[in-house]
């Protein structure tokens, strides 16, 4: 493999990408109808949300990857707990959220800001159908042109597929074995909450899609395609970033619902080892201090085992939990 050529291709893809190094032309969208692909490698599980800063509603949403067993997910599970009910108006299934009934104003503000998390599965694939290249508008076999796998997605704005599509693929694997050894076809129908996915082992004689099916093992050329390092994209966002960006909104949630999520997130953040760098810049050694307001007056905690500084008007030390009467 010519690694220098491969690196040049990867650099070109990254330069055209929009968010998390996934360019739109290097995604394969499962659209309505038949979609023939060869799945490559193990899928990775990810919980992700695009959330807008509550203090800057005009700003752009930012992507957050959420730890499944962490305090952020515990909060979101409560905020977006729902039941599914069939509407007497249109006869379709709809989600009825507990918070929407209890506090519709808070629910709408969180929903509008993008707080609802999506459960996604990331996987590399080689599509067998031509797509339009946004670089020149021509229909191409994109993986073959760029010598790179694509990301299997359910829409251009997503980074992967949801549980229904991945569950359908898993059912095929139970019957036919490792799907890396044969093409599969996804069939999508419906929209919104009523979207359904089916997945089959691709049949080369099928009159609907058989012309796209490639049987047998990957070719040497296909085996040399670069693949996305999916693990690099599922690393949870540091809790310090949640506190810095969304701490004020979390405080509002606590006040409205009588919860204590802000305290638990600060406590967890104090024990979370920050990464050495983020976007090429050094990360502060103290993730909690990074959440302090820029103009805050700081006082030292009176607990002799702590003694760390924090904003004077905070009723509790975010490091040790010592409570104070704030007048």
Image (tube, helix red, strand yellow):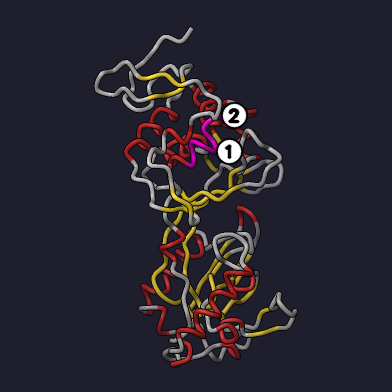
Question: Which residue is the site of mark 1?
Answer: 96
Q: Nearer the viewer, residue 313 or 113?
A: 313
- Spatial CA distance of label 1 from label 2 is 8 Å
What segment is highlighted magenta in the picture? 241-248
Residue found 65% across the figure and 61% down from its top: 190
Q: Nearer the viewer, residue 15 or 103?
A: 15
Estimate how packed mark 2 is, as few (under 14), some (14 to 19) or many (20 or more) residues with alpha carbons within 10 Å: few
- Residue 101 is marked as 2
The N terminus: image quadrant: bottom left
In this view of the protein, which residue sits in the foreground, 123 or 321?
321
Task: Name the mark on residue 169.
Answer: none
Looking at the image, do the residues carrying marks 1 and 2 touch, with CB atoms under 8 Å apart? yes
Q: Residue at x 50, y 38 (%)?
A: 81
Tell me if residue 313 is in the magenta stretch: no
Relative horizontal placement of residue 88, taking residue 302 as reference (left or right): right
Which of marks 2 and 1 precedes in the sequence? 1
Q: Position of residue 163 (x, y in %)?
A: 48, 59
């Amino acid at each position: 493999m010519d690694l220098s050529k491969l690196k040049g291709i990867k650099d070109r893809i990254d330069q055209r990408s929009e968010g998390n190094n996934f360019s739109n032309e290097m995604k394969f969208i499962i659209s309505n109808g038949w979609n023939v692909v060869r799945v490559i490698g193990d899928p990775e599980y990810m919980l992700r949300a695009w959330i807008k800063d509550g203090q800057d509603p005009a700003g752009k949403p930012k992507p957050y990857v959420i730890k499944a067993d962490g305090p952020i997910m515990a909060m979101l599970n409560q905020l977006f707990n729902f039941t599914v009910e069939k509407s007497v108006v249109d006869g379709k299934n709809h989600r009825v959220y507990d918070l929407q009934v209890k506090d519709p104003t808070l629910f709408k503000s969180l929903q509008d800001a993008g707080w609802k998390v999506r459960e996604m599965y990331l996987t590399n694939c080689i599509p067998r159908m031509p797509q339009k290249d946004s670089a020149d508008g021509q229909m191409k076999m994109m993986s073959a042109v760029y010598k790179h796998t694509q990301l299997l997605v359910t829409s251009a704005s997503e980074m992967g597929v949801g549980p229904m599509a991945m569950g359908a693929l898993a059912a095929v694997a139970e019957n036919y074995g490792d799907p890396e050894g044969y093409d599969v076809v996804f069939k999508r129908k419906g929209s919104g909450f009523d979207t359904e996915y089916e997945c089959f082992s691709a049949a080369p004689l099928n009159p609907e899609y058989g012309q796209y099916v490639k049987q047998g093992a990957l070719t040497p050329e296909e085996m040399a395609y670069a693949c996305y390092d999916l693990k690099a994209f599922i690393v949870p966002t540091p809790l310090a970033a949640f506190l810095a960006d969304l701490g004020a909104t979390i405080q509002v949630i606590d006040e409205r619902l009588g919860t204590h999520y802000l305290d638990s997130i600060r406590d967890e953040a104090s024990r979370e080892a920050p990464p050495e760098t983020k976007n090429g810049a050094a990360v502060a050694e103290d993730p909690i201090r990074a959440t302090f307001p820029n103009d805050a007056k700081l006082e030292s905690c009176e607990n002799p085992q702590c003694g760390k500084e924090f904003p004077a008007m905070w009723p509790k030390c975010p490091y040790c939990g010592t409570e104070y009467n704030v007048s």
